[in-house]
Amino acid sequence: MTGGQIGNVDLVKQLNGAAVYRLIDQQGPISRIQIADVSSLAPASVTKITRQLLERGLIKEVAQQASTGGRRAISLTTECAPFHSLAVRLGRDRIELTLFDLAGNPLAEHEEPFHYPNQDTLIEGLIYKLHTFLASHQDVLKELIAVAVSLPGLVDAEAGIVEYMPHITIDKLPLSDLIRDEFGVQCFIGNDTRGQALAEHYFGVSKNYYDTLLVSVHNGAGAGIIVNGQVFLGYNRNVGEIGHIQIDPLGKKCQCGNFGCLETVASNPAIIEHAQQLLAQGHESMLQGKKDLNVSDICRAAVAGDELARQVLVKVGNHLGKAIAMTINLFNPQQVVISGEITEAKSVVFPAIQRCVENQSLRTFHQNLPIVAAGLSGTPTLGAFALVKRAMLNGALLQRLLED
Ligand SMILES: [Zn+2]
């Protein structure tokens, strides 16, 4: 046999294992016979795979009363509590860490400022913070099976390499390997907005949809596109750079080098700057004299009827709506999810987005298209945890655990 053929046998093993685990995860409690029926795998294969999963403690048997009242059937469910993963959201100047069990229950959380002017300080600081977090939660930590990191920037998720971050110079940073070597477990990395879209798909407002578009407005603006239940990634891997759609050819210079990109007008810093300019011109507003103005302040004022704040946010809604309408025309999603502080003024921002979508995208595409606020913003590390969940469901991590 050549290496390639061995690879294929392993791949089939991984995919069959994943198919069985996925059914138990999503439809459990489920019997072996039902698994064989739904998966079209031979009953003997199902028996073999479930034996391995049972031995590893990843699933357990539960007795279920048969509906006919006959003898009790044995069904299978996943075992989530003993398997822990550390999910990290790396921001531009903050870090958030959560220890999750496999069901996505947070067991311990921590966040703190994290400033890293370059790649070396990023690696050193990150590894130190992971060690410190794990050491301080030894009392709850069971088996650590993975670490996942979501970050702003572009990554090659398969190779585990960070290729670009918006605020520091990155040179092909092999983050997954570094963390795996340090902690002895698999490490998954991903773009934070794409991770967030996946988290909403697994656990949040997008649970019942296959195709969704999530647009996030924070320090920049980005999108996560879910197509057929999977994060849409091309051969070149990174897609969804909605923040660099040009909105105003004569607009401000963007950090990408072009002019008037969406994120030069629809990002938290741009929103605050616009409000500050209007305030400096002396326009009447309840925000006059407010120190350390942030987007939540502007949202609160807008909801309370402050005209200056309303105008700032309606303008953001119009710009976002234009870019979202273009994306709807390209992808025809079943749902649009907006994430970020601006959703605190939903009643002001969403109607503006809605109007643009109605005027600028195909009618058949935007008819009955829900535009909703993200549901999981309170737990930003769920985006990283979603990468672990995906690796269990597609077999990549599952197979590793079975081989341990
Ligand atoms: Zn740009």
Image (cartoon, rainbow, N blue to C red):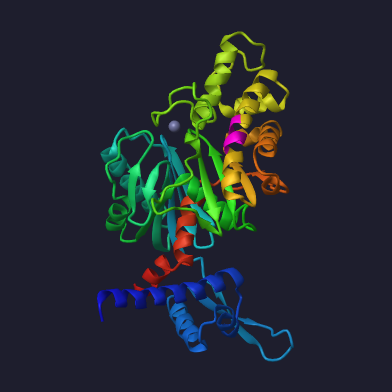
In the image, residue 169 above or below residue 278: below
Horizontally, is 6 left or right of 22 in the view? left
**Residue 259 painted magenta:** no
Horizontally, is 280 left or right of 154 in the view? right
Give how far across and how far down residue 275 sits, in percent.
58, 19
Horizontally, is 155 left or right of 104 in the view? left
**Residue positioned 28% across, 46% down in the render:** 172
How many callouts does the rendering have? 0
Q: Spot the residue most to the top.
A: 282
Residue 57 appears in the figure? no
**Residue positioned 59% across, 54% down in the render:** 211
Give how far across and how far down residue 71 sits, in percent.
67, 91
Magenta part, dominant SS: helix
Q: Which residues are magenta?
A: 319-323
Q: Within the image, what quadrant is residue 288 found in?
A: top right
Q: Which image quarter has ligand 1?
A: top left
In the image, residue 18 above or below residue 86: below
Residue nearest the viewer, comparing 353 with 259: 259
**Residue positioned 45% across, 41% down in the render:** 111
Give how far across and how far down residue 300 sits, in percent.
66, 27
Residue 235 appears in the figure? yes
Give how far across and how far down residue 312 sits, in percent.
62, 23
Quadrant holding the N terminus: bottom left
In the image, residue 198 above or below residue 358: below
In the image, residue 404 above or below residue 127: below
Quadrant holding the C terminus: bottom left
Residue nearest the viewer, comparing 81 with 151: 151
**Residue positioned 74% across, 88% down in the render:** 69
Q: Within the image, what quadrant is residue 378 found in?
A: top right
